[in-house]
């Protein structure tokens, strides 16, 4: 096999591996990547104040869907942003120190920016009653 043939074979192999990795679909025109969506969100407290460094997790609502799990930590203004998200239903969990965990369900659609607002409420400490004995 000559150098040109080896390079063509290598490029074919690389494109096949890339197609399998990104979930692309083959058409007569070549490779077309699967349509994905974008997720943009913020984490707030019950009064509308941003919660910096809040953790969030996106999990497939149906564990059999094959959707990936992803998440992270909101920035200093309580914001997060993801591109290239596979379409489907996700269970979104939000957590921050001193706040109760919140779980919501959101749908990511192809070619659409999904806005996710996670509202966390402060944890309520159990009230302690003091009884005096005489």
Image: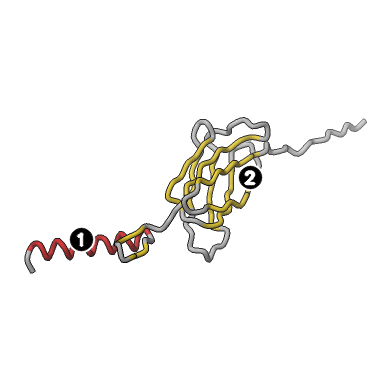
In the displayed structure, 45 sits above or below 60; it is above
Q: Residue at x 48, y 63 (%)?
A: 66
Residue marked by disc 2: 101
In the displayed structure, 111 sits above or below 12; it is above
Q: Secondary structure at mark 2?
A: loop
Of pointers 1 and 2, the one earlier in the residue sequence: 1
Q: Which quadrant of the rendered structure holds the C terminus?
A: top right
Q: Which quadrant of the rendered structure holds the N terminus?
A: bottom left
Q: Tell me the quarter of the picture where residue 35 sits.
A: bottom left
Residue sitting farthest toward the left: 2
Q: Secondary structure at mark 1?
A: helix
Closer to the camera in the image, 74 or 82: 82
> x%, y% of residue 47?
67, 31
Q: Nearer the viewer, mark 1 or mark 2?
A: 1
In the displayed structure, 71 sits above or below 19; it is above
Left-right relation of 22 to 121 = left
Characterize the local packing of mark 2: few (<14), some (14-19) or many (20 or more) Cα atoms within 10 angstroms. Answer: some
Q: Which mark is residue 11?
A: 1
Characterize the local packing of mark 1: few (<14), some (14-19) or many (20 or more) Cα atoms within 10 angstroms. Answer: few
> x%, y% of residue 34?
40, 58
Residue sitting farthest toward the front: 29
Cα separation between marks 1 and 2:
48 Å
Closer to the camera in the image, 29 or 107: 29
Mark 1 and 2 residues: CB-CB less than 8 Å, in contact?
A: no
Left-right relation of 56 to 35 = right
Closer to the camera in the image, 6 or 36: 36
Left-right relation of 7 to 12 = left
> x%, y% of residue 28?
31, 66
Q: Tell me the quarter of the picture where residue 90 sits.
A: bottom right
């Amino acid at each position: 096999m000559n150098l040109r043939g080896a390079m063509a074979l290598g490029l074919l192999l690389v494109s096949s591996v890339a197609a399998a990795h990104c979930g692309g679909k083959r058409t007569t025109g070549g490779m077309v990547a699967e349509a994905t969506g974008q997720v943009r969100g913020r984490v707030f407290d019950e009064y509308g104040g941003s919660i910096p460094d809040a953790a969030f997790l996106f999990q497939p609502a149906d564990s059999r869907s094959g959707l990936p799990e992803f998440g992270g930590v909101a920035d200093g203004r309580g914001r997060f942003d993801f591109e290239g998200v596979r379409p489907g239903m996700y269970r979104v969990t939000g957590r921050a120190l001193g706040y109760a965990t919140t779980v919501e369900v959101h749908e990511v659609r192809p070619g659409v920016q999904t806005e996710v607002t996670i509202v966390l409420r402060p944890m309520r400490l159990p009230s302690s009653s003091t009884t005096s004995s005489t």
